[in-house]
Image (cartoon, rainbow, N blue to C red):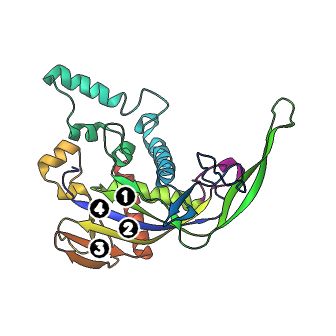
């Protein structure tokens, strides 16, 4: 399905710390004034700045998405990367063994998608390209950092085993990022919306020191843009299953009624090959709730 573009979504978001956050740098800065645990940094136009890597966001989103699916479908509903008895290690190998015995071939790409767990269908695995992408989150304005101090306590002596050590945390400021979803099914939109709700409720935190009270953020959706490969009825959002033909739906396991209906009016732009529809934050709330309801029906 990656050879064609049927639909896509671009979600522009703003992340604001509700508690101190720390995304630790993997290296040691030559700047001696920085704390022992430094916030990750990069350089933009020759100016050094802290930022939140897209990979850090993706890890948090995937972890909570797995928890959601397992809650509804059980332990086998989503991957467990610490076990070999999970998708894709077990499920795909079993299917491939079955196909090889019958037809003496490996799994086709559509079969890998069809037999992968729901989380892998969104985020990908070693044999399947993901449909979701996270951009790095850069400061929108000036962010404020401070140094926190901590120690490690010995469980035997109950005295200080290590420390004190310094931690550089962000306590205020806004970070801008984007989330992209391409060739998505509507239930995948609902899964993403549930994770965003988890972040805003404080159930999901990012970065280091979650058990210290770090990592709580507010995520505000500023704008959402959908691209469709053709003009679709007003008030509807189509998943890839609605665009696909009967043969493709059978090959990939798509649902024919892969759509939701919303009452909010978007701004529509004809881009010749694609049709773009833009919704504001209120429009996203309506879309998110409908997509979550659709996810519940699918699960």
Q: Marks 1 and 4: CB-CB under 8 Å?
A: no
**Label number found at residue 277:** 3
Does label 1 or label 2 sit earlier along the sequence? Answer: 1
Task: Check disc 4 and report the residue beneath it.
Answer: 8
The residue closer to the viewer here, 180 or 283, is: 180
State the extent of the magenta-drawn residues as a range.
202-215
Q: Nearer the viewer, mark 2 or mark 4?
A: 4
- Total count of labels: 4
User: Marks 2/4: CA distance?
Assistant: 14 Å
The residue closer to the viewer here, 166 or 229, is: 166
Secondary structure at numbered mark 3: strand
Does label 3 or label 2 sit earlier along the sequence? Answer: 3
User: Marks 1/2: CA distance?
Assistant: 9 Å
Task: Check disc 1 and report the residue beneath it.
Answer: 189
Few, some or many C-alpha atoms within 10 Å of disc 4 (few <14, some 14-19, many ≥20)? Answer: many
Few, some or many C-alpha atoms within 10 Å of disc 3 (few <14, some 14-19, many ≥20)? Answer: some
Does label 1 or label 3 sit earlier along the sequence? Answer: 1
Q: Marks 1 and 3: CB-CB under 8 Å?
A: no
Secondary structure at numbered mark 1: helix
């Amino acid at each position: 399905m990656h050879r064609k573009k049927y639909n896509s979504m671009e979600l522009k978001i703003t992340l604001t710390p509700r508690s101190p956050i720390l995304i630790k740098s993997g290296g040691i800065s030559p700047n001696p004034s920085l704390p022992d645990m430094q916030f990750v940094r990069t350089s933009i136009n020759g100016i050094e700045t802290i930022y939140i890597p897209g990979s850090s966001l993706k890890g948090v989103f995937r972890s909570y998405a797995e928890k959601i699916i397992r809650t509804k479908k059980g332990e086998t509903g989503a991957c467990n990367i610490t076990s070999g008895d999970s998708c894709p290690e077990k499920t795909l190998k079993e299917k491939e063994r079955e196909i090889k015995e019958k037809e003496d071939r490996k799994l086709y790409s559509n079969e890998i998608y069809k037999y992968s767990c729901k989380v892998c269908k969104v985020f990908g695995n070693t044999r399947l390209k993901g449909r979701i992408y996270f951009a790095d989150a850069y400061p929108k304005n000036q962010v404020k950092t401070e140094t926190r101090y901590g120690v490690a306590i010995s469980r035997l002596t109950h005295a200080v085993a290590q420390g004190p050590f310094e931690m550089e945390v962000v306590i205020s400021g806004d970070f801008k990022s984007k989330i992209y979803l391409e060739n998505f099914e509507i239930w995948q939109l609902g899964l993403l919306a549930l994770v965003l709700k988890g972040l805003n409720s404080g159930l999901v935190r990012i970065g280091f020191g979650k058990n210290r009270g770090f990592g709580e953020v507010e995520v505000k959706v500023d704008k959402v843009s959908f691209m469709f490969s053709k003009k679709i009825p007003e008030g509807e959002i189509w998943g890839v299953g609605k665009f696909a033909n009967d043969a493709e739906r059978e090959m990939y396991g798509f649902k024919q009624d892969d759509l939701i209906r919303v009452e909010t009016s978007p701004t529509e732009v004809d881009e010749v090959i694609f049709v773009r529809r833009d919704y504001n934050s209120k429009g996203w709330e309506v879309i998110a709730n409908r997509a979550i309801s659709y996810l519940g029906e699918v699960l």
